[in-house]
Image: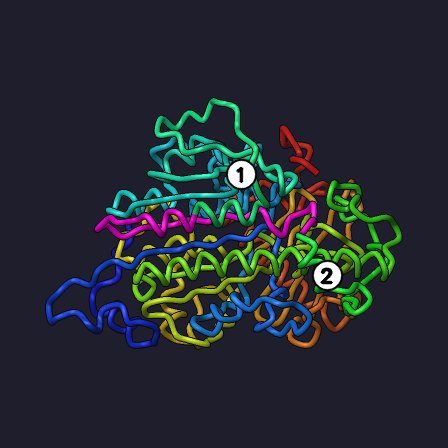
Amino acid sequence: MRAKLDRREMLKLGALGGAGLALSQPAGASPKPPNILFLFADDQRFSTIHALNNPEIQTPNLDKLAGAGTAFTNACIMGGTQGGVCVPSRAMLMTGRTLFRVPRSMVPNPYSADLPDSAWTTFPETLGKAGYTTFGTGKWHNRPPSYARSFSDGANIFFGGMSNHLQVPVHDFDPTGKYSGKPRTGEKFSSELFSDGAVKFLSQYRGDKPFCLYVAYTAPHDPRMAPRAFRDRYSPGRIALPANFLPEHPWDNGNLRGRDESLAPWPRTPEIVREHMAAYYAMITHLDEQIGRVLEALEKTGQAGNTIIVFAGDNGLALGQHGLFGKQSVYDHSVHVPLLMAGPGIARGARRDAMCYLLDLFPTLCDLAGVAVPASVDGKSLAPVLRDPKARTRDSLFHAYVNFQRAVRTEQWKLILYNVDGRKHTQLFDLRNDPLETRNLADDARQSGRIRELTALLKDHMKTAGDPMNLDQPDWGTAALTGKGEQ
């Protein structure tokens, strides 16, 4: 196990701002462990927070959170091994393990690692063993046994992936961990239902132990059916069309007929994209209001000053960008996610552009809580980045989707390779000058050396991550696998 941060490191973090984690403690005293409130959105891409350069969307509570803490502007997921990208995304977040090393018991996919229970742990489970009360509410897409291991209590628990937001099938907390009974239908809109569970926990919590409260929403995942008052705030005709809008993707990326891609007709039209974006924004604004309820309840407890608040999204969404609608790609709009952190020891109104994964949150929260990081965790703590805006824990990121898309990015460059039924394509983007990935430089002869370098870097990442694909084989080794994953 990695050593936890010592008190001097905690004091350095406390000096950054916020309420201060240890500065008010008497000399020689141990700081009280911080509470943790984790707010997790479903399908909310990075560019959907007003304070982070989106003037069209209304997110007053997320804006306040960004002002009270630090926003990571280059946070990503590693990708997906199946069409339901949120399944491996949540498994990576919870276990701190990379895409091809998450437990098969959490991601029923042939690419996942077949690990015994004793070989991995979730971050709420780790905190629970360190003395935290752990409470979960909302979406849990990684099977009941792992939920039972992670939380000591909960409410309004949804074990599925998506549903009508007014009819979410939820379970009450089952102390036996079996969850074998029939779920009941939630009595109100999903975001309200899950916020209710969080607010009730906060209002009733009287324990002396620190708590970890995990609130996982199903919004803004479709069906995009926000209450009318929120839909009325957005007129499709006033929504700007994405600058990287395309009527259709220029070639088969391996998922053009997936479920998410069927939510709009081909070719995509500006009108239909604007309609979907207006509905998407309305869902996010309604979610923002419900997040505000949870943050207000936290304030009323008097414990907000000693609570680390995390807001993140599980993956992005295209909605017309590159001619796509879903999250089943390795473009920035699909892998780039929002990540906000606020609380004791976290700088206020700060931005961090260091590249990171959501799976890095597991060791980060352990470090901030003074808890040892389990050996099973692959993620890298972001505590150094919180201390120093120039710090870097990663100099490149690796992305993958099923067995036919692979990508690597550095701070400036991104290489994407495709191999769909033997048809190969290459994309090279200069992210510094083309962040929306609109100008493919792969055919520029001057970039041939760069492509070779990035391909070598990609191969190194694939090997380290345990990726079963082999770029040197014509089919990348697909035929040797027992299954190709969901497409």
Image location (x, y in percent) of residue 268: 85, 55
> Residue at coordinates 79% horizontally, 69% vertically from top-left?
238
The magenta-colored residue range is 198-226
| Residue type, mark 1 in image | His
Q: Is residue 97 above or below residue 428?
A: above
Between discs 2 and 1, the one toward the N terminus: 1
Image location (x, y in percent) of residue 204: 32, 48
Q: Classify mark 1: helix, strand or loop.
A: loop
Per the image, the residue denoted by label 2 is 232
Q: Tell me which corner region of the image, top left, top right, bottom left or bottom right, holds residue 190.
A: top right
Residue closest to the eye, 235 or 148:
235
Q: Classify mark 2: helix, strand or loop.
A: loop
- The disc placed on residue 141 is 1
In-image side of 461 versus 345 (left or right)? right
> Residue at coordinates 72% horizontally, 70% vertically from top-left?
447
| Residue type, mark 2 in image | Asp
- The disc placed on residue 16 is none
